[in-house]
Image (cartoon, rainbow, N blue to C red):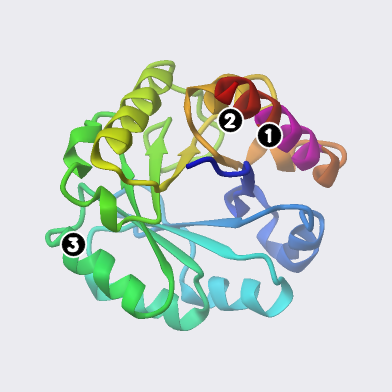
Amino acid sequence: MSFEPRIAPSILSADIAYLARDLERISHADLIHVDVMDGHFTGNLTFGPNVVAACKRVTDIPLDVHMMVSNPDETIDWYLDAGADIITVHAEASTHLHRTVSHIKERGAQAGVVLNPATPVGALEDILADLDMVLVMSVNPGFGGQRFIEGTYAKIERLVSLCERAGAHPRIEVDGGISAGNIERIAAAGADTFVAGSAVYGAADLNAEIDRMRALAKAALEGARS
């Protein structure tokens, strides 16, 4: 199954003092990526459900909430109640992953699982068919502005092969160090959803950069299919 590319700017790179303004500046985005960090699973502390609710009030763009937390089962409902459209949880943090994914979907949201750079794609073999999305981390989670880990290209390709063998069709999202300079190669490897923080918010025209990155990814995906 082939998907159209999606660009998901991360509000980790936005100016939170002017969040409504910075959401309007990315009105061409396909998703809004919200990095939730609890200070335990990662060495950083970011957004609570009140921020998700605030985003929901000022944008119609779906909210892609990435739960970098040690206790996802205890906190997921806070973010679902706040308006999350997609919830992704880390395979490394969820004790009962199938139960967690099922709960998210029962609540009416899409469910995904995240893999840290050192976690092999085989960890998802028995749950791939239940997932709407797999998020491959191309940096170690915790902070924005990190460099893309080069081994991620091969990891995406391994994930694509695993999905094909399993007959599963989740979206493949990549997060960390993505820019116009590498998005084509990431798309050619098999990804279709791209989280971009500093690459978008550091541009002079945020919507123009989103459109440019999407066009580059689309050309690469079409080239890979032909």
Q: Amino acid at mark 2?
A: Ile
Residue 119 falls left or right of residue 34 = left
Q: Picture quarter containing residue 16?
A: bottom right
Identify the residue shown where x is 12% and y is 59%: 95
Disc 2: CA contacts within 10 A as few (<14), some (14-19) or many (>=20) = many
Alpha carbon separation for disc pair 2 and 1? 7 Å
Task: Tell me the tag on residue 199.
Answer: 1
Q: Is residue 58 magenta?
A: no
Marks 3,1: beta carbons within 8 A: no
Alpha carbon separation for disc pair 2 and 3? 29 Å
Percent of width and height locating residue 88: 38, 57
Q: Is residue 149 visible?
A: yes
Residue 81 falls left or right of residue 217 = left
Q: Magenta region: which residues?
A: 209-217
Which sits in the foreground, 20 or 81?
81
Alpha carbon separation for disc pair 3 and 1? 34 Å
Circle 2 sits on which residue?
178
State which quarter of the image contains the C terminus. top right
25 shown above or below 220 = below
Percent of width and height locating residue 185: 57, 19
- N-terminal of the pair, mark 2 or mark 1, is 2
160 shown above or below 211 = above
Q: Is residue 72 visible?
A: no
Please tell me whether the stretch drawn in magenta is mainly helix, strand or loop: helix
Of tags 2 and 3, the one toward the viewer is: 3
Q: Is residue 216 magenta?
A: yes
Circle 3 sits on which residue?
98
Q: Amino acid at mark 1?
A: Ala
Percent of width and height locating residue 146: 51, 29
Q: Amino acid at mark 3?
A: His
Residue 219 falls left or right of residue 128 = right
